[in-house]
Amino acid sequence: MTVVPEDRLMTLICDSCGESATGLACVLPDAEVVWTLVTDLGWSGSPFASGPHRCPHCSLLPEGDERAACDAHGPGGVLGIDHVEDVTVVTSTGDVDLDTGDTLRAALRHAADMGGDVVVDLSRVHLIDSAGLGLLVRAQREARERQATLCLAAPSAFVRAVLRTMRLDTVIPTFASREEAVAHLAGSRPAAPTGRTAAPCGQP
């Protein structure tokens, strides 16, 4: 996969481990061609920006290992929607892209209807494209508009690299695990009042 931040500056992201590298690449009018960047950096894969691409380390893996990794990827979906300490946790799985984003969109809409904060557990997500990123950004913006917070939890190395490259790791709070995300959201709420409120002077 290749992300194109600006003009001819491109960032290669390894489809196996999430390692990234940035440099200049030739772009033709009819296609994004990055073969110069791929070869200069010692990577392997497609000459086109759509990939797939592998970093030098993953390029040394046996071909069978690459097929197994690719076979592990599946259509995007939602494993479940849980409610933990008044936080709605949406667990996504597989590849989140243009073809499979509707399932996650529906789950996030349900989470919004429940009210309160939302955690999107990405621990089982293998790949995410621009459509999937846009879905998360919109959900985070809608949560903010209703005075709530949306966090991401446990993204893979690949997803972390994509978030970092697109500078979304500074926009959407991201945590190493769903437990950390839930604890952060639960701890950020005002504490509920306990005990009897002191009466004004002169009153019982």
Image (spheres, rainbow, N blue to C red):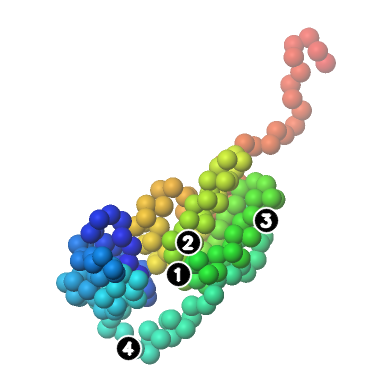
Q: Earlier in the sequence, mark 2 or mark 4?
A: 4
Nearer the observer, 195 or 181: 181
Q: Which mark is residue 131?
A: 2
Task: Write down the residue under mark 3.
Answer: 110
Within 10 Å of disc 1 (Cα), the crowding (few <14, some 14-19, many 20+) is many
Q: Amino acid at mark 3?
A: His
Task: State the SS at label 2.
Answer: helix
Q: Earlier in the sequence, mark 1 or mark 4?
A: 4
Q: Is residue 196 above or below residue 104?
A: above
Disc 3 versus disc 2: nearer the observer:
2
Q: Tell me how far mark 4 sits from mark 3, CA to CA.
A: 43 Å
Task: State the SS at label 4.
Answer: loop
Q: Which mark is residue 127?
A: 1
Q: Marks 3 and 4: in contact by CB < 8 Å?
A: no
Instruction: Say if residue 192 shows up in the picture.
Output: yes
Within 10 Å of disc 4 (Cα), the crowding (few <14, some 14-19, many 20+) is few
Q: Tell me how far mark 3 sits from mark 1, CA to CA.
A: 23 Å
